[in-house]
Image: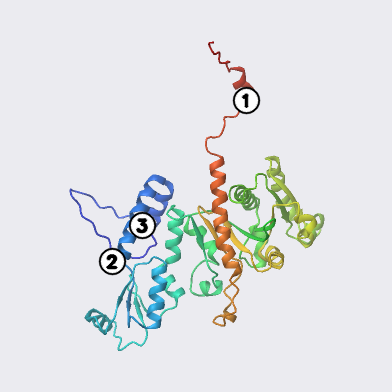
Amino acid sequence: MSGQPALVDGNAVDDVEAILVGPEEIRSLMVAEAELGEKITRALSLRRTNLIDRGAGGPILIGRSSSRDMVRLQTFLTRNAWPNSVIDPEEDREGLALLVHFRVENPDSPLVVCPDGWLLRNPSEADLATQLGMLAHATDTCATGAFDALVTAPVQKSVMMDAGIPFSGHTEYLAHRTHTPRVVMLLVGGAREAPLRVALATTHLPLREVSDHITPQSLEEVLRILHGDLRRHFGIRDPHVLVAGLNPHAGEGGHLGREEIDVIIPCLQRLRAEGMKLSGPLPADTLFTPHHLERADAVLAMYHDQGLIPFKTLATGEGVNYTAGLPAVRTSPDHGVAFDIAGKDQADTSSFITAVFECIDILNRRSDYEENRKNPLRKMTPAILANAKDEVLDE
């Protein structure tokens, strides 16, 4: 499913026909056909369990089994339930044969032979995960229901783009991988009794492109996704959303820009007519004040820095990034990779820990939402009441 090469075998007791289905088609099929998707997911899970038990089907680690880096890599793979095997050239002739094949003499650090034939020399955990397609595998298993949620670590967006990966972050990649036409970046933080939730109408874009991406259709889709997830995943029955303007002073009646008049206001009017509680467009410079926030369940900012600067100032280092609109729950810390303090034992883990607990809370709230809507009472209309008959009990 991840597009990585795999060894598949089986025994047929009768005449059969084998059909080759590509990874894109199988993912779409599993999402569209829930019952079939569940059977395929179970079969893949049982197969993976068998491969892990046998130490087969995954990357081959070549090197001294007791070396520090070998233990590091094997621990990483095992903790992520990834099949792997270790070959020590000092004890196994197969290891020597592989060294000869790859023209490596007396390696002083582990070599990793990946299923697709790539050879990695003492890779970092991140490099190994990328080569094995771990993020793709995690995304697929969540999208098809094998797992309930996904918590991702920070990524360096410039490294992704420099490597030719056509996504500016996890959010965009997850939307593409799950065939989700639109997702919404929602930051959650603050005190539990007064949480701060800030959503973005656009995400990782150059500032000069923001206006072109705020269209009547895109803004309506964002607000519908945000409204739906606030109800389903955050337990808010009738959410009230504050919507920021794009321009200074929300356009000042068109004197500082017309996006509010031409796009934002008509969109809000349409959705208000459907019953959504939406306030705005409001000037962003005064939107994040207690006077406004205390009466709202979420804020929709028009672009990245408009929402994230005040959020990170007010959330005090424990913010969580939640992706609304995905088929599975996904959270992550609200900070970057912090290369400047890497290896210095200075990293603050509070946001990552909060992301894990917030993920669990969202799953519990979603479960409550779905449970409360099972077997709903039939709505009694005047027509139904007019045709109703009283039940007569014989004495």
The residue identified by callout 3 is 45
Q: Toward the viewer: 103 or 20?
A: 103
Circles 1 and 2 in contact, beta carbons < 8 Å = no
Label 1 amino acid? Thr
Q: Which dot marks residue 381?
A: 1
Q: Quadrant of the N terminus?
A: bottom left
Q: Quadrant of the C terminus?
A: top right
Mark 3 crowdedness (10 Å alpha carbons): few <14, some 14-19, many ≥20:
some
Mark 1 crowdedness (10 Å alpha carbons): few <14, some 14-19, many ≥20:
few
Judged by depth in the image, the label closer to the viewer, 1 or 2, is: 2
Label 3 amino acid? Ser
In the depicted structure, whether residue 154 falls above or below residue 16: below
The residue identified by callout 2 is 54
In the depicted structure, whether residue 130 falls above or below residue 100: above
Circles 3 and 2 in contact, beta carbons < 8 Å = no
Q: Toward the viewer: 66 or 157?
A: 66
Q: What is the quadrant of residue 89 in the picture?
A: bottom left
Regarding mark 2 in the picture, which secondary structure is present there? helix
Q: Residue at x 44, y 75 (%)?
A: 125
Regarding mark 3 in the picture, which secondary structure is present there? helix
Q: Which dot marks residue 258?
A: none
* Residue 96 seen: yes
Q: Earlier in the sequence, mark 1 or mark 3?
A: 3
Q: Residue at x 54, y 13 (%)?
A: 393
Distance, label 3 to label 2, CA atoms, is 14 Å
Q: Earlier in the sequence, mark 3 or mark 2?
A: 3
